[in-house]
Amino acid sequence: MYDISRRVFLELLGAATAGATMASGKLSDAADAAVRLVRPRPWYEQRAGVQKTYSYCDMCLWKCGIVVSTVNGKVVKIDGNPADPKSNGRLCARGNAGVAALYDPDRLKKPLIRVAGSERGDGRYQEASWQAALDYSAERLLAVKQQWGGPEAVAFFGHGTADGWFAEYLPQAFGSPNTAKPSVSVCVGPREVAATLTYGRAFGGHEPVDWDETNYIVLIGNHIGENAHNTPMQQLADARARGAKLVVVDPRFSSVAMKADTWLPIKPATDTALILAWINVLISEKLYDWQFVEQYTQGFGQLAESVRENTPEWAAQITDLSPDDIRAVARGLAEAKPRAVVVPSRHVAWYGNDTQRNRAIFILNALLGSPGRHGGFWIQKAPWIEEYPHPAFGATADAGGCSAPGDAGGAVEAAAPHETRPRADGGDGIKFMTGSVAIQELIEPMVSGSPYPIKGLVNYGMNLFHSIPNVERTKQAVRNLDFYMAIDVLPMDHVMWADVILPEATYLERYDDLLAQAHKRPYIALREPAVAPLYDSKPGWWIAKELGTRLGLGAYFPWATIEEYLDDRLHTVGSSLQGIREAGGVLIQKGQPYIEDLEAAKKPPFPTPSGKILLYNEKLKAAGHDPVPRYVPVPEPPAGMFRLTYGRAPMHTFAKTQNNALLSKVMAENELWLNTDAAQTLGLTNGQYVEMENQDGVVSAPIRLKVTERIRPDLVYMVHGFGHQTVGLGRAHGRGASDVSMQTRYALDPISGGAGLRVNFVSVRAASVEPVQASRRPGKAALLRKEASA
Ligand code: MGD
Ligand code: MGD
Ligand code: SF4
């Protein structure tokens, strides 16, 4: 079926192509629109009664805008929202596969309470009503608070859209500073601390790289394409199409390295030496942006003195790269400046010295004059929407009485004054990680009781046994808890250790808070349900409100419905729930998108004490750290062992999508990458199952071997997120191996609290046991029967 006749199409196309930009070989927008118009209408749009709902994707944390098509109460298709600045109407594989997350037959379906007398991890549960599960949870959390000296004895972990309720709002209302997300200390934390120590401001989760106008891009690690954040993938592709140069620094010939002009196969853990050598070339050859340096930086003299010896020849010996290649990239960057960026990576918790590596990157960019300039970094602006007004934290918590379920108002009683204990992650020692708590450092107080015991854990959508290093320590910590509660959608390994399991409705079945995004042009996006929650699942906001009310915190949830809450927030930007729907699910802030001219900026864009970029940082010096980054070697793999590294595959998100029916078809298990020569020495062949043994004698599950020239011989590489152990995950169980199970050690970054994960070493040998899934894999017919009966 076609939307318009062939004749109309030809007329339209003729008119459109007349103005087409044929020089570029592309059709004009009008022609492109005409082509789109006459495409056969997809099957799901040919049915009667297709309903469209606006939302944003939750298959990863990037949050692309989507339009969800529903027919007869069933979601049939998810498309990118063309009005959305992040998706631009396009989604990655995972975004498209959201339907299979909604209809996963293995989903958690009812609240569950662990059977009395069973051990954590036994997996023995009884179904409960929401009322019973929430009453019981609140009672146990209040008992922990009472028995262990206050609310700090309860930790709150969270990751995912509704983590604002569980890892920010609720803990603040409850009075616990021990609240953390894995996306900080096991991910981007060192980068953000480095940015603050250099530019006086965090870099920002939605990396403010001006891809649209840059002419020279350097990626360090950052494997865009495998790391499938939709917007940078599109922007990098466009930049390359425009002719921007691309350099990739990676010990592995990654997908993006294949697309690069230059691949620098660096020896792992030596990147700081390379960056210092680039700084050395810019300074010694006087190639830096001296006007920018003079006007916007301080400490140039000390920087120049500090890197004097860090020549390309010096770095070549450390990095295993050639001095000429190192010099060529520095000169290329200089030639393109200020439209040149050395992109700060996202997952940067690598070696425990990660803040200094990231500081070196920010300093290098400052020498190129790229911060706040076209083709460099733009300066993020906060979105213009206001928070929902709530009582001051700490003022309204009652002494622990439970309110009736659904009592939105809750009783506001006088707060019993409480001596707040400082956060338990050793935050005092990690001086510069202000605000965020190091998640892996909160495990220790659960094990040792020091500096004080943490005895309760509320976990919203955080993969406790797949995202934090030293899983055995985490299991020991969970065994020691008085109460552990998991709010999740799947029976993940850690979920099956909880005392209470609460099934959340998936993102396609619920409202969530508005996405208020500091983007190049700040914008607000709506998530609303496309279908009603399946089974007996409930949205996160509802669970937070009901639990909060039972904890005596009802005053913090004064709104009766989520629609009322969203509507009120939208009124602060002159819109409403209906208004944002009518606007296509997205409101984009009007006006100047970002600071174009640093000199015209009203406030100094670098809010350090002096208003200047700190090439030399006095505070670091005072705290006993290097004021200018220095290369510090980290331990090398012992003979016969390899450094264990890991990364992303475009069709999976962390450890949460391996059970997805569509995505597991594309990639059912991970592989271990090993260099061809190393494999030959070990007598191992491509495709066979192998196992790893790490420096502490821990042996991995069997994993298929990928023998390849695309990796240096001193490391192995695997995709993170496989090796699930719970049988409740019908597709993911027993598939591949888990990187985190081999990460029995991590290197704590003393500046940022980051957990460097690439400090584990493994030997590789033929697998001694059969892969579980291969030996019990059901036939296709059995799988179909299972799905049909679910
Ligand atoms: P990195 O760890 O920096 O991750 O993605 P990135 O920030 O890109 O990059 C992994 C790369 O580093 C690999 O290519 C590896 O070979 C290389 N590498 C290993 N050791 C070294 C070294 O010593 N030096 C150098 N230069 N390179 C090294 C993470 C990012 O991905 C994050 S943080 C999130 S939150 C998103 N998660 C995610 C996902 O789960 N799935 C998909 N498909 N995409 C994702 N995108 C994001
Ligand atoms: P996921 O595996 O995505 O990782 O850490 P996590 O966010 O903990 O776990 C998400 C959890 O949320 C799963 O239990 C999933 O079932 C659940 N979930 C999914 N959808 C929903 C929902 O709608 N509601 C609720 N309530 N739950 C839901 C990621 C973190 O891990 C990050 S950001 C990085 S960059 C690090 N990466 C990384 C690595 O690459 N290797 C190792 N070894 N560790 C790592 N840790 C860090
Ligand atoms: Fe969804 Fe992909 Fe966008 Fe992530 S990058 S939000 S998975 S479409």
Image (tube, rainbow, N blue to C red):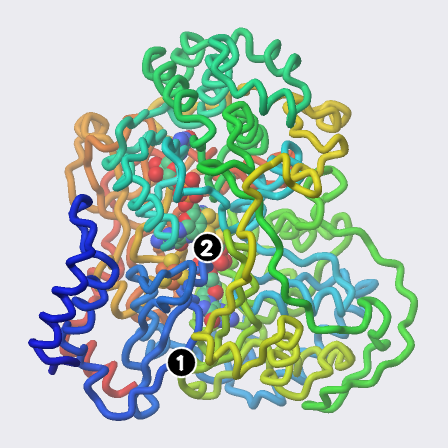
Earlier-in-chain disc, 1 versus 2: 1
Q: Residue at x 72, y 43 (%)?
A: 426
Q: Is residue 734 left or right of residue 726?
A: left
- Under mark 2, the amino acid is His
Q: On the image, numbered disc 1 is attached to which residue?
A: 53
In the image, 256 versus 490, the foreground residue is: 256
Residue beneath the point at 69% across and 51% down: 445
Q: Position of residue 712 (x, y in %)?
A: 28, 27
Residue 294's disc number:
none
Q: Are marks 1 and 2 in contact (CB under 8 Å)?
A: no
Task: Indicate the quadrant where residue 509 lies.
Answer: bottom left
Q: Which of the 4 image quarters holds residue 398?
A: bottom right
The local crowd at label 2, few if under 14, some if 14 to 19, many if 20 or more residues have their Cα within 10 Å, is: many
Amino acid at circle 1: Thr
- Residue 176 placement, left or right of 570: right
Indicate the secondary structure of the residue bearing disc 2: helix
- Horizontal and vertical percent for residue 140? 70, 76
Residue labelled with disc 2: 466
Placement of the C terminus among the 4 image quadrants: bottom left
383 lies left or right of 252: right
